[in-house]
Amino acid sequence: MKEYEEIKELVKKSGSILIAGHIMPDGDCISSVLSAGVGFERLGKKVLMIVDDEIPWYYYEFPDVARIRTADALPDFDYDLIVVLDASTPDRVGRVQKVLGTKTTVVMDHHGTNTMFGDVNLVIPTIGSTAQLVFMLNKKLGVHYDPLLATYNFMGIATDTGFFRYSNADLKVFEDAAELVGFGARPNDISNAILENRLPEELKLFADVVANMKLECDGMLAYSYVSREMFEKYGLPDHSASGFVSELRAMKGVEVAILFTERSDGSIHASMRSKKMFDLREVAVRFGGGGHPQAAGFSVKGRTLSQVIDEVIPYVVKQLKKAAARGGLL
Ligand code: AMP
Ligand code: MN
Ligand code: MN
């Protein structure tokens, strides 16, 4: 694709590069930022890696995560190029949004809902993870891969495919993952850090989420919530609820699962997952967010948890009934 060549030339001619991932960072975001950051450094570039949000504590098991900064670090860094990773809209980069376009801006992403807000946009919705786009770019640039960089790069492929279980786990995912294992990536380090690291309080919070769970549409829709009070009961941060929605989807008969969380900034975030027959993107975009057919989300400001639930659930019920009536697999 011509975008790869354009981005390769832009990186080559830039001395210092600002790399930004998205707020509410997930494994693909962190993996992509680290892989681009460490990769470009190996070409002699100066880099600043930014994720303008709190990074879940367990990612700090990977040493370079401690080098990722918030947008507070922006004023002290001069750069020739901006590379935005895994973010579908400009608001997803937090306060980095203010500097987008002040220098040539590259967007690399795999969300079908991407608004193409860069000067160069490498957006491939059929690829499992943004980390794979970074892997391809790094290879084209001649970046040297050792076990550490390979592990960082593997992480996004693993997390965005639900550790190779979701429908996006295709041949290319397995090929890229295998190539990275060939470079020394350690998949077990990643699953240990991310999957085998739950705090007792997180399990207790999850028990409360299950206790609050409601089913609609003959059990096809499962939803629940985490209020401020619930987070505070266990002294847990916002991101501690991030894996719960997949557990709701995992129930037999459930097609769509939604978890509403009341975040510390007062916004309400809806995390949505579907199994097969329901494309979540329309719902996500309708409420101001985005995502993938089977994993999407949105955040709403200025409304209470129950107001958002009361607005979203009837709409999803209606759309889900329509989809079921169509008998429709995607
Ligand atoms: P989450 O449920 O927050 O983990 O997000 C699931 C998917 O939806 C991910 O692919 C996110 O990138 C995407 N997503 C979540 N929130 C938003 C948002 N506010 N705007 C655009 N995409 C979002
Ligand atoms: Mn992401
Ligand atoms: Mn992703």
Image: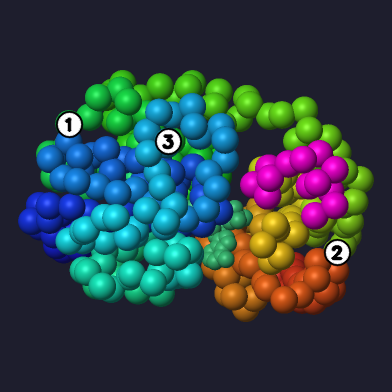
Give the Cα distance between marks 1 and 3. Answer: 22 Å
Q: Quadrant of residue 138?
A: top left
Q: In x, y percent, where is residue 264?
A: 70, 57
Q: In x, y percent, where is residue 236?
A: 73, 41
Location of mark 2 (residue):
217
Q: In the shown orientation, is residue 327 left or right of residue 131?
A: right
Q: Secondary structure at mark 3?
A: helix
Q: In the shown orientation, is residue 274 left or right of residue 34?
A: right
Judged by depth in the image, the label closer to the viewer, 2 or 3, is: 3
Instruction: Look at the image and tell me whether residue 306 can be seen.
Output: yes
Mark carried by residue 66: 3
Say whether disc 1 or disc 3 marks the residue closer to the N-terminus: 3
Identified at 83% across, 74% down, the residue is: 307
Say whether disc 2 or disc 3 marks the residue closer to the N-terminus: 3
**Rendered position, 146 above or below 315:** above
Q: In the shown orientation, is residue 68 left or right of residue 107?
A: right
Quadrant occupied by the C terminus: bottom right
Q: Secondary structure at mark 2?
A: helix
Q: Quadrant of residue 325?
A: bottom right
Location of mark 1 (residue):
144
Give the Cα distance between marks 1 and 2. Answer: 52 Å
- Mark 1 near mark 2, Cβ–Cβ under 8 Å? no
